[in-house]
Each structure stands twice: as C-alpha cells, then as structure tokens.
Image (spheres, rainbow, N blue to C red):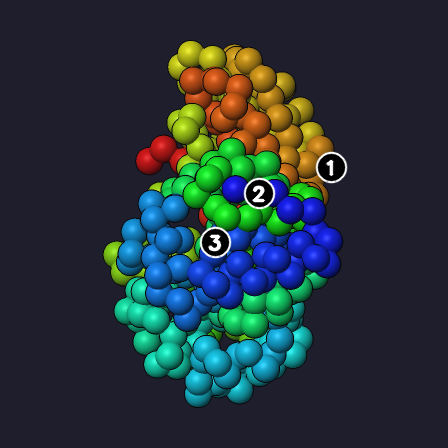
Amino acid sequence: MEILAPTPENLRRAGQALAHGGLVAIPTETVYGLGANAFDEVAVARVFEAKARPSFDPLIVHIADLAQVERVARDLPASAGRLMERLWPGPLTLILPKREEVPDLVTSGLPSVALRFPANGIAQEVIRAAGTPVAAPSANPFGYLSPTTAAHVAAMLGEKVDFIVDGGPCRIGVESTVLDLTGERPLVLRPGGMPVEEIEEVVGKVDLWDRIVSAPKSPGQLPSHYAPRTPLFLVDSGGLGKAEPEGRAVALFFDGASSAAFDATPGKARFAVRRFLSVQGDLVEAAARLFSTLHELDRLGFDQIWAERLPERGLGRAVNDRLFKASTK
C-alpha cells in the first residue's frame, strides 16, 4: 500500500492501476471510496474480499463524464436527465436500468445499476486516467465506520489496497443520497449528502424507502451498517437526560443547545466525555464531522457511546440514518 499525494503524475499512476485491475482508494466529497474497474470482475471481487462485503450488497459505479453514462445505463427516464443536469456532479446516486456489459457482481444480479458522478476533482481525474467507470464502495471493512480521511483508509484496510490517493478530509462526510428511478415514482433508498428537498425541486415529490428490507437495491440499505466497535445507543433529541449508561460512556450531542438542555435536566445521567457534531447546530457541519467524530470516540476505549438524533430535515436525515444503522438494536 502506498499513499499518494494528488500530483498529476500520481493521479495518472492511480488511474493506470485501476485500468489494470488494481484497487485504489480515492477521495470524494462524501467519503473515500475503494475503487476498481467496474468491468473487471476479478478486480471487483477483490473489493468484496478487501471489505469482507456480502455479495448481495450492490456497488456504486462512479463516472467522471456524462458521456460515460451510456456505457453503464440504458433507457434513461426523463427525470434522470433533469437530475444529471441540475445536481451532477454531486452527492447523488441514481438507480437506473443497467447495460448487459455491467457485471452482475457489481449489481448483485439486479437489472439496475447505481451510478454517480462525484464532485471531487481528484476523483474525477483518477477516473479519467483509468479510462473506465469505477465501482467504488466506501473504503472500509464492511459494516464499520466510513472513512473521511486517507489515514482512516490506511488504518482499516492497510495492505489490502494498492494505492490511497490523499485528497484531505472529505467535504460532506456522509455517503451520497441514493434515488431509485426504475419505478413509477422516484424513491429515496438511502438519505445522504444530497438533501431530499433539493431533489424534489427537480422532480417533485419523492417517496422514502422503508428501512426494513431483506433484498437491498443499493448500498447502505442493510439495517446494521457504519458501526463503531464501541456499542452505540441512539435516543431522541433531549433523551440523553434519561439515559442509563453502563461503565465509562460518552455523550454525542448535535449542538450546544441540546447540551445545555441536558445540563438542566434533574438527575441527569453522567458521561465521562461529551462531544458536539456542531456547536452552532449546523446540519452540514454535523454531517461532515459525523464519521471522524465516531472514529475518534471509538479509539478512546469507552464502554458505550450515547447519541441524540438530529432534526429530521436536510442532511439531518442522512446523519440520523447512519446513527440508526450504527446503533445497538
């Protein structure tokens, strides 16, 4: 494993490694992805092996040019064109009918493919240098915290990766929103970095997927995912005052106001440490800090982590979704 600075020469090296069957971790605006040539089944199999990822969980294919869409997808609905024009590149993954050339291993045998155009210049340059769409789930072992820095990738995957391109911390910090366009109405399969409200400005009202599912159509639909090793307990906003932690526990607040309300709660539970996703209550900042904060807390060796839900709007939906999947049920 070699960590590469994002110089033009290194980006070409990373792209060529992908073209020839290598595994390369690349930064995006959401999280770091573990990339492989989407048309190379052996390379894609290495992704599953490196992540210890169930074969039934589909991968997202990343492109760096709209001209690459037709290499992966077919029979695009009109809504897809409008979304691509308005919201790509960006943290939005579209589920579309797939072309036969896309290996079933990438789509878990489904007739649809998850497709995204990341808004990160480094990722785009690597994909262009590869000359092929790139299948790239998050660069972490399956079920664990998603990586938002190159150091996270190195710590979790190490020598299982050929190269890690260091693009610094991810700007958004939670995975992309996944929107299924294969049904009668657009359906959000996974809330993420693209707020639902922005999608609805383009295509009108969308449906939200029911979390209880046995056959995922996209990444991130399994009920337990993104989990730290430390047990995490999720409560409603204001619920930490009634928490009953065992052993040394940490409290994770959304903002300073929720912490102040906790301090005013009679008989409040005691926590060894408290952390804030955003002191000012900024949902964008909270989303960007989520995984890095959980990585930090996981390293501290506490017995439990207790977290409060965020407001169910904008990127708060995405953060709540990740916290729910990471939590002890």
Q: Is residue 82 above or below residue 279?
A: below
Q: Position of residue 8 (x, y in %)?
A: 73, 58
Q: Secondary structure at mark 3?
A: loop
Frontmost residue, 166 versus 322: 166
Q: In the drawing, what numbered circle is on residue 2?
A: 2
Q: In the drawing, what numbered circle is on residue 234?
A: none
Q: Earlier in the sequence, mark 1 or mark 3?
A: 3
Q: Is residue 86 left or right of residue 46?
A: right
The amino acid at mark 3 is Leu
Occupied quadrant, residue 237: top right
Occupied quadrant, residue 9: bottom right
Q: Is residue 274 above or below residue 122?
A: above
Q: Position of residue 243 (x, y in %)?
A: 45, 22
Q: Secondary structure at mark 2?
A: strand
Q: Earlier in the sequence, mark 1 or mark 2?
A: 2
Occupied quadrant, residue 147: top right
Residue at which label 1 appears: 280
